[in-house]
Image (tube, rainbow, N blue to C red):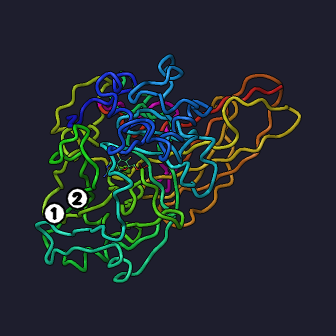
Amino acid sequence: MNQGQPERGIHELYAEDPERADWLLWGRNADLLTRRAFLSSSGLLAMTTILGAHIPFVQNMPSGLIPAALAASDEKFIIPGKEALTVLNDRPINAETPPHLLDDDVTPAHRLFVRNNGIPPNRKTIDSATWTLEIAGESCLHPKIFTIADLKKSFHHYTYHLQLECGGNGRSEFNPPAKGNQWTLGAIGCPTWTGVRLRDVLESCGIKNDAIYTGYYGDDTHLSGIASKISISRGVPMSKALEDESLIAWAMNGKDIPWLNGYPLRVITSGWPASTSGKWLKKIVIRNKVHDGVKMTGHAYRTPCKPVAPGTNVPSEDMCIIESMPVKSLITFPKSGITHSHTRPMALRGKAWAGDLDVKDVFVSTDFGGTWQKTTLHQPLNRLAWQKWEATVAFPQDGYYEVWAQAVDRNGQSQPMVLPGWNPKGYLNNACHRIAIQVI
Ligand SMILES: Nc1nc2c(c(=O)[nH]1)N[C@H]1C(S)=C(S)[C@@H](COP(=O)(O)O)O[C@H]1N2
Ligand SMILES: [Mo]
């Protein structure tokens, strides 16, 4: 069930409402009416970044005009502060990180993917000093409203390395194809998050005995622009909400959370589809039933309860909510496609993670899976953080090689070599990552 409008690209956006397109793409303030006003805003910077030059006659540039350099190509825009990301969609903004840029142990802000279901709150009008978080719901004994300062002074602070992966990461490979953002590999990252435990906050508001689920509400606007419509409102069972690592966070890597990643406050329920980690957090409800918010029901973030043949039309009642994400890994060094001198061994590095579990082993192969070599796998920095792995491989002679990586979780589950079970919305593709190497 798709409650949003279809997601669209630059030309369609401009065709429909050029001024609005300007605002959405270049971050223009709604109150600024001409491109002249850009001069003082980050919009001009965004536009000149993508054009690769400044625009001397910007004063004369009509608002709503697609720069010809972009109109003639399929090129999309660049997100200020996330320049190296690959933009999959400009409305809503969705952008992923190329695997070789996920080599840092702690994902920097400018390399964390963005997945928006709606239009983020205007950065200029967000005031973290007056921002409030409401805790309510039918299974909450004492509903309360907190400012961020209240949260900071009332509860103990925790910092964890927590990975965040979109449930649709890898969707682009499904066949028949699944609608939605065509994520390849990069809707994953593992920054540090600082905040208070969701458990401490919920317990301070009284959790009734009949509580079974949480639900979040954020401050983003539905794509239609209609204030009463909600773009997404998901949650987790109480058992997940009450875990030590489930946070209400105000900082990422020791700084304010980036605007597109949920500034000034968000939920982090790591190891589960990142759609459970609500951004621009305004409210959490404690529910006496499975939360029935937008994108909790129908086919959203659900897979068939029993495996189905590709292309099957699965009725909603046979779809089950995705919980812990499956085991997965990436090769983050080297970059796919490099040339390597065969006289030297080659260093490989990557990351592996396994939802609520940890990773037991990562193996690599340079002969299309004929033989496998165990890598050096590091312990996670804390529970639910991804794990670094390293290996050195040698190539017997010149030619085309592929390096494949395969992780195995604590329970012995391995990543599949090929696409795992097809599902209507294209979730949970944890097939092995492979890169190409030319040995000369
Ligand atoms: N309020 C709000 N929270 C949200 C979303 C959203 O659109 N609005 N998207 C969800 C989805 S589907 C994902 S994958 C993650 C993405 O987090 P990121 O953009 O910080 O990487 O945020 C989740 N939380
Ligand atoms: Mo997502």
**Amino acid on which the number 2 mark rests in the picture:** Gly
Q: In front: 369, or 51?
A: 51
Q: Is mark 2 within 8 Å of ligand 1?
A: no
Q: Would you say residue 421 is visible in this rendering?
A: no
Where is residue 263 drawn, in percent x and y? Answer: 40, 59
Left or right: residue 257 compared with residue 284: right
Q: Residue at x 47, y 28 (%)?
A: 60
Q: Which segment did they paint magenta? A: 408-424
Q: Quick one: SS at disc 1?
A: strand
Query: How busy is the neighbourhood of tag 1: few (under 14 within 10 Å), some, or many (20 plus)?
Result: many
* Residue 305 included in the magenta stretch of the image: no
Q: Would you say residue 364 is visible in this rendering?
A: yes
Q: Is residue 86 above or below residue 413?
A: above
Q: Residue furthest top?
A: 72
**Amino acid on which the number 1 mark rests in the picture:** Arg
CA separation in Å, label 2 and label 1: 7 Å
Left or right: residue 374 compared with residue 284: right
Say whether disc 2 or disc 1 marks the residue closer to the N-terminus: 2
Q: Quadrant of residue 419?
A: top left
Q: Residue at x 46, y 41 (%)?
A: 38
Q: Residue at x 57, y 38 (%)?
A: 98
Query: How busy is the neighbourhood of tag 2: few (under 14 within 10 Å), some, or many (20 plus)?
Result: many
Residue topped by disc 1: 287
Residue topped by disc 2: 215
